[in-house]
Image: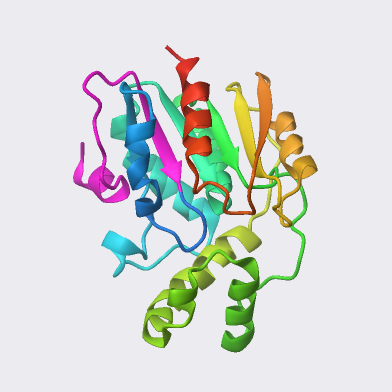
Amino acid sequence: MSAASDSWVSSRRPARTTRLRLFCFPYAGAGASIFRSWSDGLPTDVELCPIQLPGRETRLLEPPYARLSPLVEAVAEALTPLLDRPFAFFGHSLGTLIAFELARRLRELYSVSPVRLIVSAGAAPQLSHRGRPVHNLPEKEFFAELRRLNGTPLELLNHAELMEIMLPLLRADFAVYETYQYSAAPALECPISAFGGLQDARVTRADLAAWSAQTNDAFSLQMFPGDHFFLKQPLVISAISQELKWHR
């Protein structure tokens, strides 16, 4: 694996006999560490590849991307050496857009496709963004919005020095999502699985069902207990494992 790939794929754990690589894309403000414990719950022949985006954790000193297109281009280049095996994508919230546009870009560049795209807590890309943009709000209002969304730990929100460090990253991640412009293209040829939270007030079942328009293959939808951050439970890993068992 190249040095560029190594910086993008954090804590990669090659399986003894790798059948498939699972690339995981985090939600806004999060790093690859949110997926670190998933290896134990995945099939033994699935290699977990958590994506570490710039501006966080091991890449804290690198400037974060504030637009999706250049981010996708950089990820596509970095992952090229790892596309020698079948692969799948998982994305949560902001990560769904990254995974989706990356799948379209890899199809354009190399005529390759993930064996499955798993989108979690993210509305279908062709739907209009709801709500006011928050990435350029004054600091006090931006913090209030972070508290309302309930995705940033309270201990972080209450730590002024850490929030000063995290603020540019959070604004950039929100900008990636809020400035995204969907462009029509042929549907993907891989199956899509959509996951949602039963108590998620931000992404509805209808928002998730609309992903069916983005594939010419099979589509499935599963709902889990919890709000927008329902992924922090073993049920989700079990569901991913079941989805990936079909690809042998």
**To which quarter of the image does residue 40 belong?**
top left
Query: Is 159 above or below relative to 93?
Result: below
Magenta region, residue range: 1-25
- Residue 215 visible from this viewpoint: no
Residue 140, given in percent of the width and then of the height, sits at 60, 88
Q: Position of residue 96 (x, y in %)?
A: 57, 45
Of 129 and 221, the residue lying toward us? 221
Identify the residue at horizontal 47%, vertical 54% (top origin).
70
Horizontal and vertical percent position of residue 88: 46, 29
Q: Any magenta on residue 20?
A: yes
Q: Between residues 182 and 13, which one lies in front from this camera angle? A: 13
Q: Position of residue 54 (x, y in %)?
A: 36, 60
Classify residue 45 by image quadrant.
Answer: top left
Residue at the image position 50 percent from the left and 44 percent from the top: 233
Q: Is residue 244 above or below residue 173?
A: above
The residue located at (61%, 30%) in the rendering is: 193
Near-viewer residue (80 or 157): 157
